[in-house]
Image (cartoon, rainbow, N blue to C red):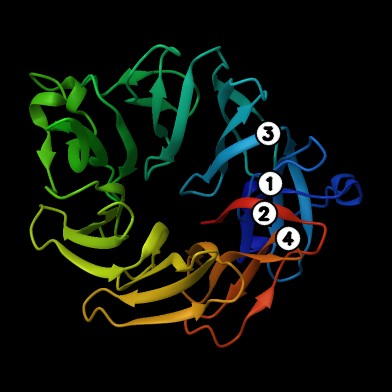
Amino acid sequence: MGRVIRKTILGVVLVSLGISLLWMTMRPLLAKPDVLVLEVNDRSGLYLVDVNRGLTAILTRGRVEAPVWSPDGSKIAFLNSNGFGRASLRVMDANGGHLIELLPARFGVEYERPSWSPDSQQLVFTMRKTMDDPQLDIYIINADGTGLRQMTNYLTDDSWPSWSPDGNQIAFALHRRNGRQFNPNIYVMDANCDQLPGGCYANLRQITNILAARYPAWSPDGTKIALIADYFENLYVVDADGSNLRSIARGTGLLWYHWSPDSKQIVFASSTSARSWGVSVVDIDTGETHMIDSGRNAVAPAWSPDGSQIAFLGVKDQNFQVYLTDPLGLHMRQVTGPETDGFRFAWSP
């Protein structure tokens, strides 16, 4: 079934969105889509959207957060909240079947940012063990719920883990004290560092030494790491060994970015005014930037797996809709309908 689904719709976007009751009753056999999470009339869920046909089907109901496709396209991991400060970490098949609860919802326990290993066998994520725990730590768990491993324990927050394309390393932000403040910078650890002498702490490699570095993401070819720093005002790229750090784009409120599949460009969203956001594309080598949308309060852009399209969220009639365009921004179209209001999306592999 998973193979049939992947074959049927290549350009689908996995979207966790809030939708009307009419759409909630539909569940056609769609393939993989992009992800938005939102509540409508106290409902929310994870939906499939075919960007070519505009169809939407529900995968699971509930308050869904941070859904991510496995690289092989067979599964989706996500957080499922009960609305009372508790969320469980779950995995299901891409067609909505075979739901597994990897870690249960517990009062005061906080899970964040699950990310798949390249072989689709494990997830890395952050967890706060109790409400009184001052720190987020990084953990790895197998996709079947076995083999939970704690990777970090540094008395400060360790966050935004990102797996390297070869599966051997994990980049993340580690908060260390700088005077009175804790300043995050980007570090890299081996994916098996918990099994090395001295553990992960003894085998860390610091990649940046700048102000407020966050959100690391490996380039698809594994040679570079992108990150946001300087309190969300600079988009940086650095070689994977920590050399050649450079700012490639400046803006205000830089919160979202995504690598192109060929590792040559990055699409990002930043504030264009006090109440508006726009989406731009920057060339990694030249630094040349062009805006592809500035009129829809556009956020959360992401490249399609083949590099031919960029999807993003834009506001229309006070709701967030999914839009699709070419990388130059010349051919724009709305994918989702007026009954949709969403928060996150992600392309199927």
Inspect this view and state whether residue 223 appears. no
Cα–Cα span, label 4 and label 1: 37 Å
SS at circle 1 = loop
Q: Which residue is mark 4?
A: 318
Mark 3 against mark 2, which lies toward the viewer?
3
Res 312 quadrant in image: bottom right
SS at circle 3 = strand
Res 345 quadrant in image: bottom right
Q: Position of residue 207 (x, y in %)?
A: 13, 47
Mark 4 against mark 3, which lies toward the viewer?
4
Q: Which residue is mark 1?
A: 1
Q: Which residue is mark 2?
A: 5
Cα–Cα span, label 2 and label 4: 33 Å
Q: Which badge, 4 or 3, comes first in the chain's sequence?
A: 3
Q: Which residue is mark 3?
A: 63
Q: Residue at x 73, y 54 (%)?
A: 341
- Verify CB contact (< 8 Å) between mark 2 and mark 1: yes
Cα–Cα span, label 1 and label 3: 26 Å
Q: Which badge, 4 or 1, comes first in the chain's sequence?
A: 1
Query: Relative to 110, is 175 on the left or the right?
Result: left
Relative to 225, say whether 259 is above or below.
Answer: below
Name the kind of residue labelled 4 in the image.
Gln
SS at circle 2 = helix
